[in-house]
Every structure is written in structure tokens, then in C-alpha cells.
């Protein structure tokens, strides 16, 4: 056990920092559950998937979180434009397809890295 001695000025400054960040803080477990739901959404309906309100309160956007998942090797993305022949108009129509695959190895630790990056803190297992 460690004992930390704080003077009143240091305590006030730490308290103010904690108070300022209290609205944006979510615990790792909540972040993890929301991230898993987001990943499930990307696997099933990638164009309709949005991040949760809790994650957006952390200051992360939908596209930014998606890119973090791709950059950290949690998911891979495949995009394709197909032009099937439309029988009604008699012309080919362009359609954009996007699909994701999940890499499950070390998923929780990789999500923890993203969480630490977003919150700028270290968490314990």
C-alpha cells in the first residue's frame, strides 16, 4: 500500500480535473459492451450502424471509431462496386457494397487499447 500526501492546492487541482471529466467518463465495461454491439451492427448492417450515446459522449465519432477498429486490426473491411443489369430500365445500375470481418484474437485487449487512447488513462485488468 502506498500513502500519498497532498497539500490543499494540489487536492483542489486534482478534484477540478476529475470534476471536469466526470461527464465524459464511462467505465471500460460499458465501453466494451457498446463496442461489441457496434461490431455486431457492422457485421450485419454496416450502413445503419451508429455508436452509442455513451461512446459519443467520450468525444468519438462514428467514423473515427470505425477507423480505430480497422487500424488496430480488430476488423477488416471489403468494399465493392457492382453494376448489375436492371431489367426495368435496361441499363446497369451501380451499387456499393461494404462488408466487415471480425478478428477475434485478443479482442478485449485491443478494445482496451482503444479505450485507453480515448480516455488517456491506464486501466487495470
Image (tube, helix red, strand yellow):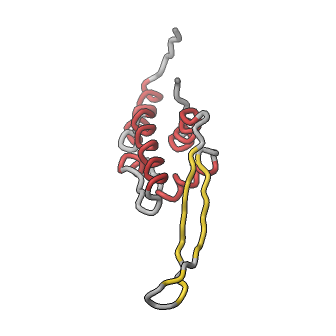
In percent of width and height, residue 16 lies at: 40, 37
Instruction: State how many labels appear.
Output: 0
**Is 12 located above or below residue 82 in the figure?**
above
Between 118 and 100, the residue placed more toward the observer is: 100
At 52% across and 52% down in the image, what residue appears? 65
Between 27 and 81, the residue placed more toward the observer is: 81
At 45% across and 52% down in the image, what residue appears? 59
At 53% across and 56% down in the image, what residue appears? 64
**Is 119 located above or below residue 5 in the figure?**
below
In percent of width and height, residue 78 lies at: 61, 60
Between 98 and 62, the residue placed more toward the observer is: 98
In percent of width and height, residue 17 lies at: 44, 38
In percent of width and height, residue 22 lies at: 37, 39
Between 49 and 15, the residue placed more toward the observer is: 49
**Is 28 located above or below residue 23 in the figure?**
above
At 47% across and 86% down in the image, what residue appears? 87
Q: Which residue is most to the bottom?
A: 90
Q: Which residue is most to the front?
A: 87
Amino acid at each position: 500500500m502506498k500513502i500519498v500526501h497532498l497539500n490543499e492546492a494540489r487536492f483542489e487541482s486534482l478534484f477540478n480535473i476529475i470534476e471536469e471529466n466526470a461527464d465524459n467518463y464511462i467505465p471500460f465495461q460499458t465501453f466494451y459492451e457498446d463496442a461489441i454491439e457496434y461490431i455486431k451492427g457492422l457485421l450485419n448492417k454496416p450502413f445503419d450502424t451508429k455508436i452509442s450515446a455513451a461512446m459519443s459522449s467520450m468525444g468519438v465519432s462514428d467514423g473515427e471509431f470505425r477507423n480505430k477498429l480497422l487500424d488496430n486490426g480488430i476488423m477488416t473491411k471489403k468494399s465493392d462496386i457492382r453494376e448489375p443489369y436492371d431489367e426495368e430500365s435496361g441499363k446497369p445500375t451501380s451499387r456499393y457494397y461494404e462488408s466487415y470481418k471480425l478478428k477475434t484474437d485478443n479482442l478485449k485487449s485491443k478494445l482496451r487499447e482503444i479505450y485507453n487512447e480515448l480516455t488517456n488513462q491506464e486501466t487495470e485488468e
